[in-house]
Amino acid sequence: MSEEVFVPMLPQIYPRLKREEEVQWVERFLTSGLSLRSFAAEHGLAYWRLHRWVGRKRRAEQRQLESSSSFTELKLAGSPFAAESAEPWSVELRRADGLVLRLRQEVSSALVEQLLKPC
């Protein structure tokens, strides 16, 4: 009679990667066009690890955006906007990335769209 030996399944152990390697994996993932799950499976990575690395990168980018001042005042010479005015802003638009566009007077939607385009 053969004896059956029970061997419990151990969780797969993943070696710890250096931060540079994590960044390289994230960059490869972002340019792959694949979903997190597909990319992780295709490259033998744990989904949760790749998810954490991508989240870490996005949070770092968000902190960098928030900490850098990206405000630039544009003065349009020879236009009704050129004169200093004590009038309050007529419109204030805020994008999700923190960009703010303030207007004192009515402008065309094409100009607003152009001003809101990322640099």
Image (cartoon, helix red, strand yellow):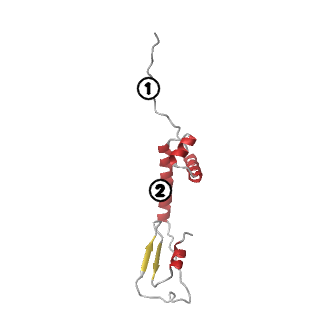
Q: Tell me the amino acid under the disc marked 2.
A: Arg
Q: Residue placed at 50% from the left, 66% from the top?
A: 68
Q: Position of residue 46 (x, y in %)?
A: 50, 41
Can you say whether 77 is above or below 3 in the image? Answer: below
Mark 2–mark 1 distance (CA, rounded to whole Å)? 38 Å
Seen as rendered, the residue at the extreme top is 1
Disc 2 element: helix
Closer to us: 39 or 60: 39
Residue bearing mark 1: 8
Instruction: Count how many numbered circles sit on residues in the image.
Output: 2
Can you say whether 90 is above or below 6 in the image? Answer: below
Disc 1 element: loop
Could you tell which of marks 2 and 1 lies nearer the N-terminus? Answer: 1
Residue bearing mark 2: 59
Q: Tell me the amino acid under the disc marked 1.
A: Pro
Q: Position of residue 25 (x, y in %)?
A: 57, 47
Q: Residue placed at 47% from the left, 66% from the top?
A: 97
Seen as rendered, the residue at the extreme left is 88
Can you say whether 94 is above or below 84 in the image? Answer: above
Q: Residue placed at 57% from the left, 42% from the top?
A: 42
Give the side of residue 89 with respect to residue 75, left or right. Answer: left
Q: Position of residue 64 (x, y in %)?
A: 50, 61
Q: Position of residue 80 (x, y in %)?
A: 51, 89
Point out the frontmost of discs 2 and 1: 1
Q: Quadrant of the C terminus?
A: bottom right
Q: Residue 88 bears which disc, if any?
A: none
- Badge 2 density bin: few <14, some 14–19, many ≥20, Cα 10 Å: few
- Badge 1 density bin: few <14, some 14–19, many ≥20, Cα 10 Å: few
